[in-house]
Image (spheres, rainbow, N blue to C red):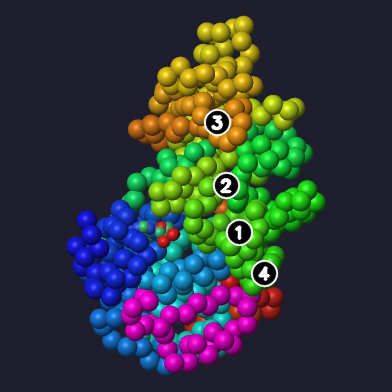
């Protein structure tokens, strides 16, 4: 299948040729014709699948073929949860629309609003925005939605996780009812279905394989260790496996900074990216990493959503994410567009519930490799969907009662790597999950071969992870406070005006809304 066969016009095809896109990805094959036909879309596609081009290309084509904008008006609005993603999606529109006479811009908080107002003055074809800043712009009457044709909600699940539900309500009330709406989400949770039901009309539904696509292409393994040993273990792995550039995920912003300091003290060049940093500082850190000026970029999950770094071979989960879906987003930073990638998690005993949730969601038991000298004093319990790992370990123990630890054995009777053990490595599918290929310069660290996924998920996508977003909010985001039943609560500060307009009556309350990063 070619892009031409999907009905894309010449100037777009030429751009894609320049970019080296030879054929459409699965999500593009389905989304492009549907969007060109003016249909609403509900797509389960995570980052790394080519989803951005899946919506950007047909939108750009429709905007080119049909009409012009007017002062302050926008014709397409792309709502995204984070500043990084906003920048990335905007860059995609600029790049895909390089041969088209269209104007696009990006708007998010944490930077002065005036330049954004200036850009809007003459009108835009495409605006990529985070919800909070968009409400601010609307409150200041800097933007008109009267000409809006298409609304895209990108990473809608993340928007809900970050507490943007109320902002979305405000914005949806302000947008014209007659429009095309495209909703992209990593998963179709109940919350997303509810949101979709309220905003989509007879949508084409697209599901690009399971939500664990990345888990099939990215080699994953974990090293059990104690929490306090993690910095030392990371330094050890960097040296031992001769890693080049690594993206490291840490749970908290404070944790990020502490790790960066430790790394720098050991002569490793590292920078950080998280919600406490200003947007220019975040972009600077990302640019330094992209330009290979720093070896390690240490990030929280918020940053993960917008990072598209070409040929990133290595991701390290220094901490496991609190929300299982974030694991997929994190490891999706590597192995992009068919490249090889590897994701290593350093797991301590008190992360075992998070590990279980991740393994349930991704339908796999992540292969464990003990690193000699870093074994956990606080043992990380065996995990695995439906207790597969525990059962297998029990079986192995019964078969070989004399052996405490089972050595590596590759599928073809591969030689055991010295010092390495496979615990819980066999997959639900019953296949041997280990090849004895060293991941780097040393034999003790092997590389895991993904098992065939089992037919049925052992639980619902979110069943083991608890409520999405519960307990995890990075980047300064807080869920909007729950309003008493039936009450119309209009807070002061940003959005009050829009909300008042929407609700028809207002009881402005000082204190301001608190939502996610803008
Ligand atoms: P996305 O899922 O939109 O974040 O895209 C992931 C990566 O895939 C980006 O770096 C895109 O440039 C790249 N990409 C998107 N579509 C294609 C394609 N058809 N062929 C090759 N690369 C692509």
Residue 118 percent coordinates (x, y): 53, 90
Query: For residue 281, which numbered disc appears in the image?
Result: 4
Q: Which residue is drawn at 33% across and 75% down?
A: 60
Q: Give the range drawn in magenta.
A: 97-125
Cα distance between the residues tagged 1 and 4: 16 Å
Q: Which residue is drawn at 35% across and 33% down?
A: 455
The residue tagged 2 is: 315
In the rendered structure, which disc, 4 or 3, sits on the residue that comes first in sequence?
Answer: 4
- Residue 480 vs 133, above or below: the answer is above
Q: In this view, does 419 lie to the left or right of 117?
A: right
Camera-side residue of 242 and 236: 242
- Residue 423 vs 50, above or below: the answer is above
- Residue 411 vs 226, above or below: the answer is above
Cα distance between the residues tagged 4 and 3: 37 Å
Q: Does the magenta stretch include residue 512?
A: no
Judge whether residue 3 can be spotted in this image.
yes
Mark 2 is surrounded, within 10 Å at the Cα level, by few (under 14), some (14 to 19) or many (20 or more) other residues, namely many
Quadrant hosting residue 110: bottom right
């Amino acid at each position: 299948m070619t892009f031409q066969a999907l009905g894309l016009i010449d100037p777009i095809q030429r751009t894609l040729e320049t970019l080296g896109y030879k054929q459409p990805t699965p999500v593009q094959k389905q989304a492009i014709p549907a969007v060109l036909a003016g249909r609403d879309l509900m797509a389960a596609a995570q980052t790394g699948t080519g989803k951005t081009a899946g919506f950007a290309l047909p939108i750009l084509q429709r905007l080119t073929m049909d009409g012009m904008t007017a002062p302050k008006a926008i014709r397409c609005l792309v709502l995204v949860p984070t500043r990084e993603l906003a920048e990335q999606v905007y860059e995609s529109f600029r790049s895909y629309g390089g041969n088209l006479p269209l104007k696009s811009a990006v708007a998010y908080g944490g930077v002065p609003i005036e330049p954004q107002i200036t850009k809007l003055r003459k009108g835009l074809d495409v605006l990529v925005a985070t919800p909070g800043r968009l409400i601010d712009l609307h409150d200041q009457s800097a933007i008109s939605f009267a000409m809006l044709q298409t609304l895209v909600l990108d990473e809608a699940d993340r928007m809900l996780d970050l507490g943007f539900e109320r902002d979305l309500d405000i914005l949806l009330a302000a947008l014209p009812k007659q429009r095309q709406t495209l909703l992209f989400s990593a998963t179709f949770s109940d919350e997303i279905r509810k949101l979709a039901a309220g905003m989509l009309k007879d949508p084409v539904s697209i599901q690009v394989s399971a939500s664990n696509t990345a888990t099939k292409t990215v080699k994953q393994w974990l090293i059990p260790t104690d929490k306090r040993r993690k910095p030392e273990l990371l330094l050890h792995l960097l040296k031992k496996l001769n890693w080049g550039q690594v993206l490291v995920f840490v749970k908290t912003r404070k944790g990020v900074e502490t790790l960066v300091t430790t790394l720098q003290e050991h002569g490793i060049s590292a920078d950080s990216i998280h919600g406490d940093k200003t947007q220019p500082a975040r972009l600077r850190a990302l640019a330094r990493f992209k330009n290979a000026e720093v070896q390690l970029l240490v990030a929280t999950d918020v940053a993960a959503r917008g990072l598209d770094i070409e040929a990133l071979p290595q991701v390290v989960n220094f901490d496991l994410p609190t929300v299982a879906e974030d694991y997929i987003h994190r490891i999706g930073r590597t192995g992009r567009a068919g490249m090889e990638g590897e994701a290593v998690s350093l797991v301590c005993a008190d992360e075992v519930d998070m590990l279980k949730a991740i393994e349930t969601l991704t339908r796999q038991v992540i292969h464990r490799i003990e690193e000699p000298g870093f074994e956990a004093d606080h043992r990380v319990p065996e995990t695995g969907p439906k207790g597969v790992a525990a059962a297998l370990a029990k079986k192995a123990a019964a078969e070989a009662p004399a052996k405490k630890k089972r050595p590596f054995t590759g599928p073809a009777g591969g030689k055991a790597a010295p010092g390495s053990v496979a615990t819980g490595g066999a997959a639900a599918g019953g296949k041997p999950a280990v090849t004895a290929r060293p991941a780097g310069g040393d034999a003790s660290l092997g590389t895991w071969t993904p098992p065939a996924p089992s037919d049925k998920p052992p639980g619902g996508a979110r069943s083991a992870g608890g409520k999405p977003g519960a307990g995890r909010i990075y980047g300064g985001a807080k869920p909007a406070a729950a309003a008493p039943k039936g009450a119309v609560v209009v807070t002061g500060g940003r959005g009050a005006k829009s909300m008042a307009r929407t609700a028809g009556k207002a009881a402005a309350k000082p204190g301001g809304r608190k939502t996610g990063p803008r």
